[in-house]
Image (cartoon, helix red, strand yellow):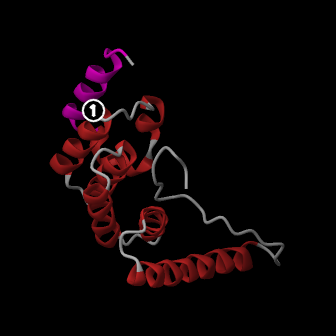
Amino acid sequence: MSNQGKHSGEETSSTSIGNGPTRLAAEKQSQLDFELDFFAGILNRNPEFVDVLRVHGNNLTLKCRYEDGLKIDRRLVTLRPQDALAHYNLACSYSLLKKIGHALRALRKAMELGYRDLRYLREDRDLAALRRDPRFRKLLREFENRPK
């Protein structure tokens, strides 16, 4: 997982020397399903394991399980209230669910806590729903002009 945020189009880390794109896609799919089951098991035993929560939330997003990913991101923000990346990922989850107001509030909080990769933020597919909102552009302008 990137230190910038989660990605709805990101591939899993597994690789294959298979027999073409179909096999590769099937192996990646099965790897993702394996990871979902594996990390869910870890979280059943240790529900506050932050590193696992981050990976599991990203994997849920990759599977388009946005509501489940949102639950994970809410839990991360509760466990790590000063973590800019946790708030950024929460904004992504809200955006994917078209909850624009919530997404903008979470994104503002991420930026207030120090998230400053504005170039990435402009390109992140998870935030596509926000880009049409004038409040998003206003927020970017506000933080572009702030000292680092």
Give the extent of the magenta segment.
132-147
Q: Which residue is disc 1 drawn over?
A: 112
Percent across and percent down for residue 18 are: 81, 77
- The reply, left or right, for residue 147 in relation to residue 134 is right
User: Which quadrant holds residue 134?
Assistant: top left
Percent across and percent down for residue 3 are: 52, 46
Question: Residue at the spot x=60%, y=62% of the render?
Answer: 11
**Figure quadrant of the C terminus:** top left
User: Which quadrant holds residue 141?
Assistant: top left
> Callout 1: few (<14), some (14-19), or many (20+) C-alpha neighbours within 10 Å?
some
Question: Residue at the spot x=69%, y=69% of the render?
Answer: 14
Q: Amino acid at mark 1?
A: Glu
Question: Residue at the spot x=25%, y=58% of the render?
Answer: 78
Percent across and percent down for residue 102 are: 18, 50
Q: Nearer the viewer, residue 44 or 93?
A: 44
Percent across and percent down for residue 22 are: 70, 77
Q: Nearer the viewer, residue 6 or 136?
A: 6
Q: Image height check: is 142 above or below 30?
A: above
Secondary element under disc 1, as helix, strand or loop, is helix
Question: Residue at the spot x=31%, y=16% of the render?
Answer: 146
Q: Nearer the viewer, residue 106 or 126?
A: 106
Q: Image height check: is 112 above or below 103?
A: above
Q: Nearer the viewer, residue 84 or 10?
A: 84
- Residue 141 colored in magenta in the image: yes
**Figure quadrant of the N terminus:** bottom right
- Residue 137 colored in magenta in the image: yes
Principal SS element in the magenta part?
Answer: helix
How many marks the image carries: the answer is 1
